[in-house]
Image (cartoon, helix red, strand yellow):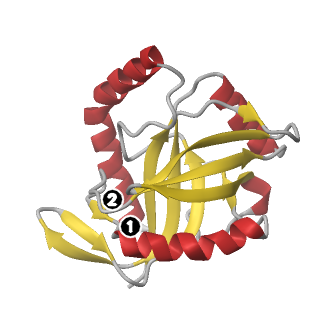
Amino acid sequence: MNNLLIETRLFEGKVQEDEGGRSIVKGILQRAGAENQNGRVYPREILEREAKKYEVLIKERRALGELDHPDSSVINLKNVSHNVREIHWDGDDLVGTVEILPTPSGNILKELLRAGILLGISSRGMGSVTNIGEGKVKVGEDFELIGWDFVSNPSTHGAFMTPMNESVNRQLQKQAAVCNEWCKAQDLMREIITELV
């Protein structure tokens, strides 16, 4: 059975402007082979396959994402906030460059990031999972990546995007540690609600 699979990590990116004056952020989008807070493990070979397919959308400038996750596998154009411009591997981390679009949702996203608000970058995909014991599941071969959205409530904690400096990085790590117990409860509630839908 294919389910909507959502994985989120903290995104701490500084808004920069490219040569054309467009707002961009860079950082880790997803990590392969590591258990996340939802107990899911994404095998490297599956993420590599999906990243390669996603590069077609990037080349066509159709690698769109939304501000907040919808409960759907369809990208809703009225909520689009960004376009992924480039992805590459750095070890087991899938890293990307994201262009913030001048849409209503994109403008909100840009101002939140400029204000230093911690947001999550969250993958959205369809697929099945297999229980591998000890509360862990492995994402199946049928996984299909839809894209990445920016969200307010991350499920993966302590994974920070391109820190601006050491003092900011230490402050963000402290915030993630404080959030950990509360966020676990929120993650559990999110999983229960998702299973009921």
In the structure shown, which secondary structural element does the residue marked by tag 1 occupy?
helix
- Number of numbered markers: 2
Going by the picture, which residue comes out furthest to the right?
20
Residue at image position (58%, 69%) is: 146
Residue at image position (28%, 42%) is: 184
Q: Is residue 160 visible?
A: yes
What residue did someone put label 1 on? 196
What residue did someone put label 2 on? 192
Compared across the picture, whether 139 is left or right of 7 comes to left
Compared across the picture, whether 49 is left or right of 59 comes to left
Quadrant for residue 20, please give it. top right
Would you place residue 87 above or below residue 23 in this image?
below
**Label 1 to label 2: alpha-carbon separation:** 6 Å
Question: How far across and down, in percent of the image, does residue 176 sit?
Answer: 35, 30
Look at the numbered discs 1 and 2 and tell me whether their residues touch, using CB distance below 8 Å: yes
Q: Amino acid at mark 2?
A: Ile
For the C terminus, the quadrant is: bottom left
